Image (cartoon, helix red, strand yellow):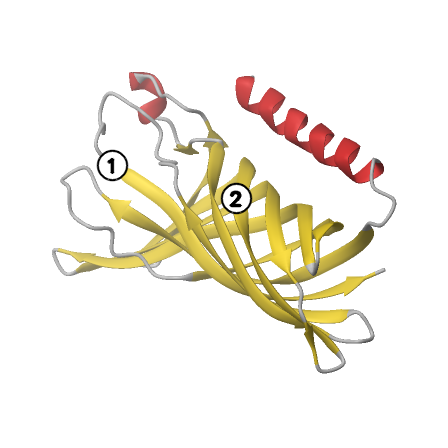
Amino acid sequence: MKTKIFLLALILAVTVTAQAQSEFSFGIRAGVNFQNINGKDANGDQLENDLTTGFNVGVNMEIPVGTDIYFQPGLLFTTKGTKSTNEILTQQYDTKLSTSNIELPLNIVFKPLLGTGHMLLGFGPYVAYGIGGKYKLQTNGTDLDWDVKFKKELTDAEVNDEVFYLKPFDAGANFLIGYEMANRLSLQLNAQLGLLNIHPDNPVDKDSIWKNTGFGLSLGYRF
C-alpha cells in the first residue's frame, strides 16, 4: 500500500510541475529492451543469466530548467526479465522470466545544438511497479509455466505455491544518449541499473539478491 501511495504521489508531483510551466513539450517513445537479472543465489554464487528481449512504450514531458537543460519525467509500460540454460545430471533446463511493469523515469537531459538537431545526454532515477508476468520452464520436452505475482515477503505456504513471486517495487538509475533531428524525431540508446533487490524475503531463501539491469534502443517524437 505504501508503495502505491508513493508512486501516485510522484506522478501527481510531476503533473503539477508540468502544469506550472509555460514552455513544456510532450513526447511519445517506443523501443526494444535487452534485459537481465544480475546478483547472487542462495549459496552466494553469481547468477549466470542471459539477456532477454522485451519492449517499452510510453510518454514523457520536457520542462526547461536551464540553458539546453530539461527535466524529463515520463510514464512507461515496459517488459523486463531474464533467461537461463542449466544442465543438471545430463538434463537441460531452460527458463525464461518475463515481467510487465509501470515505470516512472525522472531524467535530467542536456540538449546542445549539434548540426540541424540536438544531441541528447541524460541521467536520472526511475521507480517501477510490477503488474504481471510469466515464468516458463522447459525440460525433456515438457513445458511448464507459472504466473508472476508480486509480494515483498512470503510465508512457508507461498514458497511452495505454483506461483513465481517477485517484489513489486523496483528503483534504479537511467542513462541515455541520443540525437533529436530537426523534424523532432529522435533515436535514443539507454541503459538501466537496478539498485533494489527484487527477490522476495522468505524463510527458505534469505540470501538471494536479484537486480534488474539492461539497455535498449528507442524511437521518439516530440510535439
Asked if residue 34 shows in the view, the reply is: no
Across and down, in percent, residue 61 comes to: 75, 49
Q: Is residue 55 above or below residue 145?
A: below
Q: Residues within 10 Å of mark 2 (few under 14, many from 20)?
A: some
Q: Is residue 164 above or below residue 106?
A: above
Dot 1 or dot 2, earlier in sequence: 2
Q: Nearer the viewer, residue 90 or 55?
A: 55
Across and down, in percent, residue 142 comes to: 36, 53
CA–CA distance between discs 1 and 2? 24 Å
Q: Nearer the viewer, residue 101 or 104?
A: 104
Quarter of the view holding residue 103: top right
Label 1 secondary element: loop
Q: Is residue 188 above or below residue 170?
A: below
Quarter of the view holding residue 188: bottom right
Label 2 secondary element: strand
Across and down, in percent, residue 48 comes to: 25, 56
- 17 horizontally vs 195: left or right: right
- 14 horizontally vs 170: left or right: right
| The disc label shown at residue 125, or none | 2
Tell me which residue sits at (40%, 62%) in the image.
51
Across and down, in percent, residue 97 comes to: 43, 49
Q: Which residue is mark 1?
A: 208
Indicate the amino acid at tag 2. Pro
Q: Quadrant of the N terminus?
A: top right
Q: Quadrant of the C terminus?
A: bottom right
Q: Nearer the viewer, residue 142 or 193?
A: 193
